[in-house]
Amino acid sequence: MKQRPFYLKILVALGIGYFIASILTKNVFIVNSPRLRQNLGQYLLAQLTGVINNSGSFLANVVGGRKTPEQALGNVPLQQVAKGVYAKNGNGYSYTIIKENEVEWVVYKTILNGKQITIKIPKGQMPPP
């Protein structure tokens, strides 16, 4: 019965070795070739920094509660971008509103895959091919 934990240790070691080898082949070698990355240290540092930044922002969102762009930009006034299109941005957020009743539409009807479809395009723009 002592052999069972021994085999389990071997399986765990093989699994860990497989994951380490797969990570190294993706990060150390260039496009499945035997060539090593020239800037391996800088590359690994950038990858590690990206992971730390992503996990930090994830924790901040979980702890502080995730705000929608509408909530984060509550006191910023809307600016008109085009007729019927309004936007506001700041603090890494952007928010866009399209008021369809203010936009002048041109309606095109076409047949696609045997079905007739209707496309609405703002006036003055070319329809898609």
Image: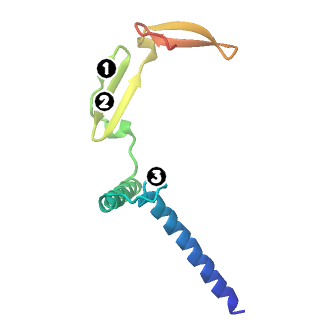
Q: Mark 2 = which residue?
A: 88
**The image quarter in which residue 53 lies:** bottom left
Q: Amino acid at mark 1?
A: Val
The structure residue drawn at horizontal position 36% and vertical position 58%, both measured from the top left corner, is: 37
The structure residue drawn at horizontal position 58% and vertical position 75%, both measured from the top left corner, is: 14
Q: Say whether residue 63 is visible.
A: no
Q: Amino acid at mark 3?
A: Val
**The image quarter in which residue 3 lies:** bottom right
Q: Amino acid at mark 2?
A: Lys
Per the rendering, the mark at residue 15 is none
Q: Mark 1 = which residue?
A: 81
**The image quarter in which residue 94 lies:** top left
Q: CA distance from mark 2 to mark 3?
A: 42 Å
Image quadrant holding the N terminus, namely bottom right
In depth, the one of 36 and 88 nearer the eye is 36
The structure residue drawn at horizontal position 65% and vertical position 87%, both measured from the top left corner, is: 5
Query: Up-down: is 33 above or below 109?
Result: below
Query: Are the residues tagged 2 and 1 within 8 Å (C-beta)?
Result: no
Query: Up-down: is 9 above or below 37?
Result: below
Per the rendering, the mark at residue 31 is 3
Name the secondary structure under disc 1: strand
Name the secondary structure under disc 2: strand
Residue 76 on image: x %, y %: 27, 32
Disc number lying in front (1 or 3): 3
Q: CA distance from mark 1 to mark 3?
A: 44 Å
Q: Residue furthest right?
A: 1
Q: Earlier in the sequence, mark 1 or mark 3?
A: 3
Residue 114 on image: x %, y %: 70, 14
